[in-house]
Amino acid sequence: MHLIWLALACSPDSDLREQDTGSVDTTLPATTPSTSTAPAIVVGRTRYDGVRHGPLTSSVVDAMQEIASRGDGGENAFMKVGDSITVDRNALSCFSGDQVDLADDQVLEATRAWFEGSWDRDSEAAEGARTAAWSLDGPVTAEADLFDPRYALVQFGTNDMQMGTTHESAIWAFGSNMRTLGDLLADRGIIPIFSTIPHRTDLESAEEWVPIYNTVVRGVAQGLQSPIMDLHGALREVDGFGLRTDGVHLSAFDSSLGCNFTPDGLEYGNNIRNRLWLESLDRVLAARQGGPLEPDDLPSLQGAGTPDDPFIVDQLPATWRQNTANSAVSEIDSYPGCDADQDESGPEQVFHIELASDTRLRAFVFDAVGVDVDLHLMDDTGSPEGCIVRDHQLIDENLEAGEYRLIVDSYVDDGVVLSGDYMLVLYSGA
């Protein structure tokens, strides 16, 4: 079958990068290299609601341009950052071969040609059986130094899930490493374009955790306001989730035909992924040269994070990157309702959650280096005595329908307030 949503996802403005000759317009907004080493942390702006491509609103375009201002990388170059799914012989490199069939998507040809030198490059930052942690220990820096790209296609998680005693225990390092990876790329002037990971039919326990890992990936991209594509969602459309018989790696339409976009080709995982990557790059080029592709009135996080005006959680799963150091509120010092005597006298941020039905709620918090914030699930009063359960990293609770407050509070260690940058991930379901 033909994946109709893929055709619809291609913006009608995507040919903005083409001149009358059909060649790619190399004119991009002027950027001034920045000496800043601060990561791009964006609060309360465009929210990514599990769409096939992260929305390219004014907020996202501005964030991409700000990242680009930090370096002078080649505008027609991207680096690959990933594991065996990225280095698969049917992934990406086939765009440099003679068996490319864009079928009804010839508008993407200009973008394919624009990145000609990147498709079949053997990246120092992409290798089989690797994790996000591995990429940080030299490979990303090495590839960036060698190739000097403007963009990075990033996909990790499949192997990262196996790096703990359980998939749950492995998620903390994954979240931290992915945030560090995104910040590292951004600080070098490289715009990261993230991908969710595919299904895992090899292990039932892994398949259950894939959506949670993907929510972490979405949170990293949303926090940077950088592009993301939902490979996991796209693969739901095809038999066997587009996987080989091993239940991990992506299938392809015949040997070396991963860049065939005919209806028959788009029944296979690699073909779908290749099309999504090409489409993502096409969208980013169009947005950076011609302006936002999506309207600016898309949902964003509502509220101020205070007791009187809490952040509103209006859907699950949800994820945000926030910073307690930006909060002027520091009203709760301890949580006697949870029998807790930890010193939580640092600044806090408040989230309001309303559940329409009984729900298993899982809340994960990923601290930045040097930050220690804790989670406190409260009844609808939000008072210290109304604390239901607290934890340093994870709350996993079966809740009745009703209203709740989740407070992210800053721990104080021997007088040192450990407030700062964190990512919150909320997930419902088994």
Image (cartoon, rainbow, N blue to C red):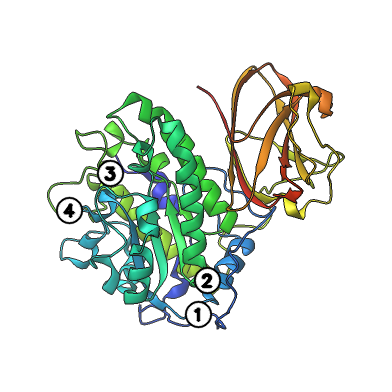
Dot label at residue 28 = 1
Cβ atoms at labels 1 and 4 below 8 Å apart = no
Q: Earlier in the sequence, mark 2 or mark 4?
A: 4
Residue on which disc 4 sits: 257
Looking at the rendered structure, the kind of residue marked 3 is Gly
Looking at the image, residue 92 lies above or below residue 266: below
Cβ atoms at labels 2 and 1 below 8 Å apart = yes
Q: CA distance from mark 2 to mark 1?
A: 7 Å
The residue under the point 23% across, 47% down is: 265
Looking at the rendered structure, the kind of residue marked 2 is Arg
Q: CA distance from mark 3 to mark 2?
A: 29 Å
Residue on which disc 2 sits: 288
Looking at the rendered structure, the kind of residue marked 4 is Leu
Res. 104 visible in picture: yes
Residue on which disc 3 sits: 269
Instruction: Return the residue found at the far left.
Output: 255
Label 3: element kind:
helix
Q: CA distance from mark 1 to mark 4?
A: 33 Å
Instruction: Return the residue found at the far front.
Output: 414
Q: Earlier in the sequence, mark 3 or mark 2?
A: 3
Res. 54 visible in picture: no
Label 4: element kind:
loop
Closer to the camera, 405 or 88? 405
Cβ atoms at labels 4 and 3 below 8 Å apart = no
Where residue 155 sits: x, y (%)? 38, 51
Looking at the rendered structure, the kind of residue marked 1 is Leu
